[in-house]
Amino acid sequence: MAGRKTIKQRATLRHVRLRKKIRGTAARPRLAVYRSLNHVYAQLIDDDLGVTIASASSVEGDLKKEISKQSKTEISKLVGALMAKRAKTHGISNVVFDRGGNKYHGRVKALADAVREGGLVI
């Protein structure tokens, strides 16, 4: 079956299509989310300068103590709350959400909701 694409290939195509429309600036950086099988990562990116302003992930030492025996969705909520807190320390209140080619449900939606609860406007 030569025409079939894997789940990862389809996600990559969705991400390319999404990135044509989304661009982060210093005033409104891009909140990029990457979801692996076991972990979730989030970054605030200024695309004009090509720099990462802040980041948070489920592999950090700060969250390692809290995430034992929790579901992946609950861990994503913790990462989103941490991302919102770090954005506030940099004086950022508005972001553009980049779901990274993933569908907007489950862990990606949980992270976005936690960022909104933390005070950021998506």
Image (cartoon, rainbow, N blue to C red):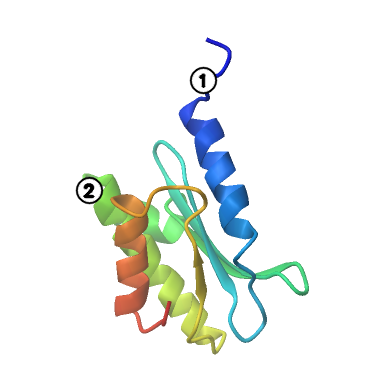
Tell me the residue that label 1 is attached to.
Answer: 4
Location of the C terminus by quadrant is: bottom left
- The amino acid sitting under disc 2 is Gln
Dots 2, 1 in contact, CB < 8 A: no
Is the residue 87 above or below the residue 108 in the image?
A: below
Q: Residue furthest bottom?
A: 91
Q: Which mark is residue 70?
A: 2
Residue 20 image point, x, y percent:
65, 59
Residue type of the residue flagged with mark 1: Arg
Image coordinates for residue 120, horizontal then vertical, percent: 41, 81
Q: Secondary structure at mark 2?
A: loop
Is residue 67 in view? no
Marks 2/1: CA distance?
A: 35 Å
Residue at position x 60%, y 76% in the image: 29
* Helix, strand or loop for disc 1: loop
Which residue of the protein is positioned furthest toward the front in this rendering? Answer: 3
Residue 104 placement, left or right of 50: left
Which of pointers 2 and 1 lies earlier in the amino acid sequence?
A: 1
Residue 100 shows up from this direction: yes
How would you rate the neighbour count of disc 2 (Cα within 10 Å): few for under 14, some for 14-19, many for 20 or more? Answer: few
Residue that appears at 66% across and 79% down: 25
